[in-house]
């Protein structure tokens, strides 16, 4: 499967991100499989005892599961990293992705499973009646993060979105 061709980050750079938590050490090989330019944007990778991940793009921080199957941990890492570097309201890539695949806040065909669930689970997305504090790009950002993740994991994702990502990142 295609990969972005960038040099691997140094072990020292990766260790600076994962910090002191010994449970985070298992993430070093995963970070080395992702674009170094993106990994360098992370200020911190933290672990928690939940199954999913979280991202805090303004703080450039991701929180990932403390345990799980390696392929699942890599998938969560790639998805959350995408939120920090691309799939957030401050990103021009996110804006362009939303304009292309979410015209007028409605998804085009080929929506990822995770983004579809985010979209369908909340009537506010479909009706446009969003609370003031809601990120208007939320479902679209999940779609972009899933596309980014699939680029590295080889998971099934809309080929048009994947081709778009490869030309814009």
Image (tube, helix red, strand yellow):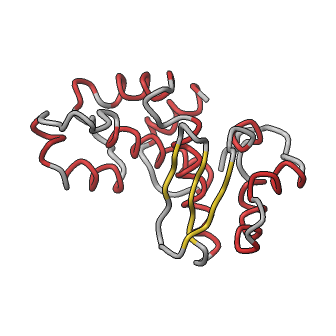
Residue plotted at (77% across, 41% down):
36
Q: Is residue 118 left or right of residue 153?
A: left
Q: Position of residue 121 (x, y in %)?
A: 19, 55
Choose top left, top right, bottom left or bottom right for residue 69.
bottom right
- Where is residue 102, by image quadrant? top left
Determine whether 118 is above or below 57 in the image.
below
Figure label count:
0
Q: Quadrant of the C terminus?
A: top right
- Indicate the position of residue 84 as horizontal and vertical percent values: 56, 41
Asked whether, in this view, residue 132 is left or right of residue 110, the answer is left
Viewer-nearest residue: 17 or 96:
17
Above or below — where is 4 with respect to 79?
above
Q: Residue at x 34, y 34 (%)?
A: 137
Identify the residue at image location x=54%, y=37%.
58
- Residue ID at (53%, 40%): 57
> Relative to 22, is 77 above or below?
above
Relative to 119, residue 29 above or below: below
Q: Nearer the viewer, residue 14 or 82?
A: 14
User: Residue 16: x and y, percent?
Assistant: 81, 52
């Amino acid at each position: 499967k295609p990969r972005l061709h960038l040099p691997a980050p140094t072990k020292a750079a990766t260790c600076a991100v994962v910090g002191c938590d010994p449970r985070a050490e298992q993430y070093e090989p995963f970070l080395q499989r992702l674009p170094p330019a993106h990994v360098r944007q992370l200020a911190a990778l933290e672990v928690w005892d939940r199954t999913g991940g979280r991202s805090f793009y303004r703080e450039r921080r991701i929180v990932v599961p403390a345990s799980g199957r390696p392929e699942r941990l890599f998938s969560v890492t790639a998805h959350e990293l995408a939120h920090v570097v691309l799939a957030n309201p401050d990103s021009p890539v996110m804006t362009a992705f939303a304009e292309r695949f979410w015209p007028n806040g409605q998804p085009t065909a080929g929506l990822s499973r995770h983004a579809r669930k985010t979209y369908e689970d909340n009537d506010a997305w479909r009706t446009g009646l969003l609370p003031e504090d809601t990120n208007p790009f939320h479902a679209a950002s999940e779609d972009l993060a899933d596309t980014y993740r699939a680029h590295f994991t080889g998971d099934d994702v809309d080929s048009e979105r994947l081709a778009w990502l490869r030309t814009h990142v």
